[in-house]
Image (spheres, rainbow, N blue to C red):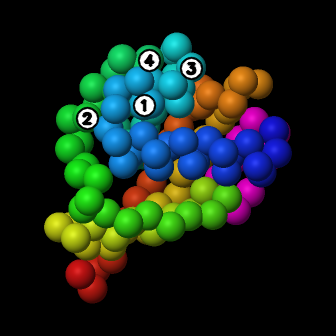
Amino acid sequence: MKKKDFENWLKAYVKAWKSNKPEQITNLFTKNALYSTGPFDEPWKGREAIQAGWIAIGDQPNDWKFDYEVIAVDGDLGVMHGTTVYKSAGTFSNIWLIKLNKDGKAKEFREWFVRNRDN
């Protein structure tokens, strides 16, 4: 995989995040993908569970701004650093580990986020 593959996937992820449309969410992932929302959280398993978990979090499209960059790629693994600023919840620093299959769908997604203590 190349950096551009991960950048394209992230663009699609942000588009799905802004829309919360189920088909855009599920199209990001393989059938049996794993999605971990934190290092100690049980991952969501499969597209339907990912979509349900995503929607249940309840992020509203106009409540946040997200800036990111792919900082490393090694084979099928991409690492992203991002900053999410929520109007309602403050600023978060994010690290995402994304494993893509040959078709550019995520087979594994792991995120770590830390809230800025100043807000």
Which residue carries the number 2 mark? 55
* Local SS, label 2: helix
Camera sees residue 105: yes
Residue 113's place in the image compared with 85, above or below, is above
Residue 4: where, in percent of width, then height?
Answer: 76, 49
Residues under labels 1 and 2: Cα distance?
9 Å
Residue 109: where, in percent of width, then height?
Answer: 53, 37
Tell me which label, 1 or 2, sits earlier in the chain: 1
Which residue carries the number 1 mark? 25
Q: Are marks 1 and 2 in contact (CB under 8 Å)?
A: yes
Tell me, for residue 30, which label it has, or none: 3
Hey, which quadrant is residue 24 in on the image?
Answer: top left
Using a 10 Å C-alpha cutoff, classify the residue at mark 2 as few (fewer than 14 neighbours), some (14 to 19) or many (20 or more): some
Label 4 sits on what residue type? Gly
Tell me which label, 1 or 4, sits earlier in the chain: 1
Tell me, for residue 46, which label it has, or none: 4
Residue 45: where, in percent of width, then height?
Answer: 42, 20
Label 2 sits on what residue type? Ile
Label 3 sits on what residue type? Thr
